Amino acid sequence: MLKLTNINKEEFDEFVKNHSKSHFLQSLSWGEFAKVKKNLTPFYLGLVNEENKIVAATLLLQKRLPLNYCYLYAPRGFVIDYNKKEILRAMTNKIVDFAKKKKAIFVKIDPDIIIKKYNYNNEEVPLDNNYEEIFNTLKELGYKHQGFTKNFETMQPRYTFRIDLTQDLDTIMEHFSKTTKQRIQKAIKLDTEVSIGNKENLEQFYHLMMLTENRKDFISYGKDYYETLYEIFNGNKNSKATLFLGKINFSKTIKALEKNLKSINDQISILPIDNLSKSAKAKLTELTKQKENINKEIFKYKECKKDLGNELVLSAHMIIEYGDKAWVLYAGNHNILTETYVNYNTYFEHIKYCKEKGIKIYDQFGTIGDLSEDNPRFGLHQFKKKFGGDYVEFMGEWDYVTNKFMYFVFTKLVPFYRNAIKRKSKKELENEVRDNK
């Protein structure tokens, strides 16, 4: 006899962390964060057998609605073996009973089930799950699939890039694009640095997030959002938020360039200037060009040092670690000195960091399925693709409706009403502008 029960938070987190379907969005830390910053009520539920052993679990987040209704959301789905139909059936039935007691009009899940995967060469990779059978089981159990969306319409991204960190580092690097390898090498030659930050560096991180968001014409969160996330995930032994800072130290960069310049001058000095062969002339031309470019760079970085100080953080990334996985949750980058490619080197360093820590899956947390070049997020997709991860597509969202009438009201009528109000307001504004001309 299986029963659903509220379980001890620590016991819940241990089960989730060690499960094959572990995800930071199902963690205790995310539940506590959602309570503080998203005004959601977390429930830590476990399906236990007669021996009181947990066989499945889920974080359910309750979103309150008007008229004392609510809906429940299990981010990235239940922590369960979806191939075990009877356990999935029991979990569904118990969750539905729980939802009805809470006056929930529906329960939303978006399982971490991959339905397609392509490697760095765009070759389809065979899957180790029978997703069609899982898909049909969910339909049979009464869930309504919300469609195969292509962008960021859903609670969580339906597409992402994942790097398998069980591969050796050389293989991982081989899958990087040619330009990515070159840009990482340039950042290294400029002697740029990547270090791990702490709570005091959140101010710099937030500044770069603001620059990035302004550049992309959207604003997401305030500084306290990131501070709370950082504190909660680092306050739990099972999760971790790590801040990576990519920076340039102008004195070190100038010194590295001057060393390179000396090497070029040494090469020029040994050429027989009075009797150059055709190949030697070509080499002299190339070395002279390199020398000019380096002198320009030295001058530029000396000016930057005067204007900006000796050190400047150009990239700041926040990585979430949970179980055997890591996610690049947020990345902020400066508007200037992009030609140093510090951003690329920062990514490279946290890939190496995660591999050294024994992380198995490195998730770049979100991309698009609509790959038309006029898609505003196409550039982001191409950037993430350059790091050679597998391009994966998830199953998508499912709703289990527990109150058909109110579900219709809140998912159809309310959005229609809101859009009508927006259209009316826009029309009134246009009329007012016209009348005042």
Image (cartoon, helix red, strand yellow):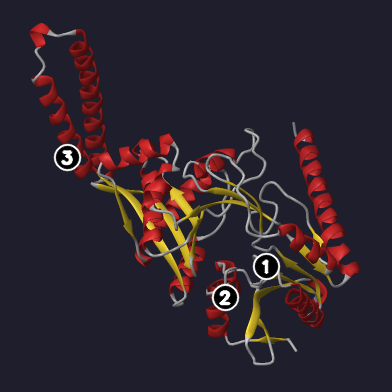
Q: Residue furthest bottom?
A: 51
- Which secondary structure lies at badge 1? loop
Q: Position of residue 311 (x, y in %)?
A: 26, 48
Disc 1: CA contacts within 10 A as few (<14), some (14-19) or many (>=20): many
Disc 2: CA contacts within 10 A as few (<14), some (14-19) or many (>=20): many
At 13% from the left and 20% from the top, the residue drawn is 268
- Which secondary structure lies at badge 2? helix
Q: CA distance from mark 2 to mark 3?
A: 49 Å
Q: Which residue was labeled with disc 2?
A: 16
Quarter holding residue 73: bottom right
At 74% from the left and 31% from the top, the residue drawn is 437
- Mark 2 or 3, nearer chain start: 2
- Which secondary structure lies at badge 3? helix
Q: Is residue 51 left or right of residue 275?
A: right
Residue 43 can be seen, yes or no: no
- Mark 1 or 2, nearer chain start: 2
Q: Is residue 43 above or below residue 356?
A: below
Q: Which disc, if any, is residue 77?
A: 1
Q: Amino acid at mark 3?
A: Lys
Q: Which disc, if any, is residue 374?
A: none
Residue 158 can be seen, yes or no: yes
Q: Position of residue 155 (x, y in %)?
A: 67, 59
Q: Position of residue 253 (x, y in %)?
A: 23, 41
Q: CA distance from mark 1 to mark 3?
A: 52 Å
At 38% from the left and 57% from the top, the residue drawn is 244
Q: Which residue was labeled with disc 3?
A: 255
